[in-house]
Amino acid sequence: MTVIPAETAAAPGLAAQAAAAAAMLLTQAARQDWRGPDPYDGLFFAWPAWVTGGRRRRQLIVQAHARAPVDIRRLYRRTHPRIAKALGVFGSVGMRLSRRGDPDATALALAALDLLEADRTAGAAAWGYPFDVQTRWSFYPAGSPNVVATSFAVQGLLEGAAGADRAAFRNRAVAAARWVLDDLWVQRDGFFAYHPTAGVNIHNANLLGAVCVHRALGEDAAVRERVSRAVDRTLSAQAPDGGFPYGEGAGLEWRDSFHTGFVLRCLMGMEAIDPAIGDAVRRAAESYLTFFDAAGRAKLFAEREHPEDAHSAGTGLSTLALLSGRGAVDPAVLARVTTRTVTAGLRGGHAVARRYRWGATTTRYLRWCDAHVALGLADAALALSG
């Protein structure tokens, strides 16, 4: 990975600051027993059937929780679920910080991954969310496995298996990847579905599935054929300016920062699969930079100044670390976003979810913000220190 020249860092010891901030978020998550509110957990509560009877009503509940500037959950509940994806991401955070010689981070990572490996709430193979999810294009119930939660869980378990010689972690990761390969593959159209009943190609989900089976199942011919088709499907959707839409179909043409980051990170994890990936990533990098301003703010949407978004910052740091290591972006961009995140992106031991023109969201989102910001800071620390 490319070493960031000292003169590009906004402050001395930026890598150390990033690592310390990531470790703080990891420690705070462990103190909370890996539990916390989530932007999309509005349906976790047992609302009366007439309240949730229909897609629009469910969307209203979910979006009211996700967009509220304060935590309205406090009006009706005091406990929060533990989310498998958060365990996987924090597992990766701890294992990456361990590469900087942090034994406490290693111990916390293994604690999170032990819980993840034992989690069967979404079935024996994969992972999902402990609440119903209603998006603009799909619905899936609590406890049903999906590719996003599973892919991040597999990644964390593989890192734990490699760093701590845990065979059980690897076995569970391989079984989950096999589930993705067998149950989420849409043979006719050549993509990995978001969840078993989804018939729409969502590009970041497709590639998260592809990179999951690529990493866990190796170079088996059947795996390679499906992964190659999935990659081709998303590469064919790349726009002339290098960007990628969220999905295929009416109403899914939009783009945001963190989903774009997921696509780029997955592609960079599969460069050996297709020689076209390198050129696609180089073309996408310029478009991706429009999500970050000169002050290092991570914007949710490139064409809007607000909101500044923590999930975009965390995913942005991980993505920019990879892009700068390949010479696709100026390393100074990574330094600016890292500096902004360390100095303004954290408050009270948590990530600031969103900042608007006037005010900021005060809810502390463990999975959605803290986990991804911690992962981004850990990746930035490794990149900034070479």
Image: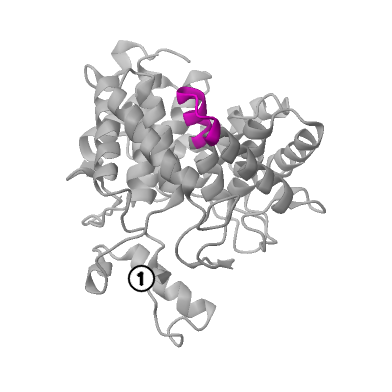
Q: Measuring 81% from the left and 32% from the top, which residue is drawn there?
A: 221
State the image coordinates of residue 299 (x, y, percent, origin top left).
38, 45
Q: Measuring 57% from the left and 56% from the top, which residue is drawn there?
A: 123
Which residue lies under the disc numbered 1?
A: 64
Q: Nearer the viewer, residue 5 or 135?
A: 135
Q: Is residue 308 above or below residue 222?
A: below
Q: Is residue 282 above or below residue 255?
A: above
Q: Secondary structure at mark 1?
A: helix
Which amino acid type is marked by label 1? Ala
- Crowd around label 1: few <14 · some 14–19 · many ≥20 (10 Å): some
State the image coordinates of residue 197 (x, y, percent, origin top left).
67, 64
Q: Measuring 46% from the left and 48% from the top, which residue is drawn there?
A: 85
Q: Main secondary structure of the magenta part?
A: helix
Q: Is residue 221 above or below residue 100?
A: below
Q: Is residue 120 visible?
A: yes
Chain part drawn in magenta: 157-168
Quadrant of the image occupied by residue 342: top left
Q: Nearer the viewer, residue 70 or 91?
A: 91
State the image coordinates of residue 246 (x, y, percent, origin top left).
58, 52
- Magenta-span inclusion, residue 158: yes
- Magenta-span inclusion, residue 219: no
Residue positioned most to the left: 348
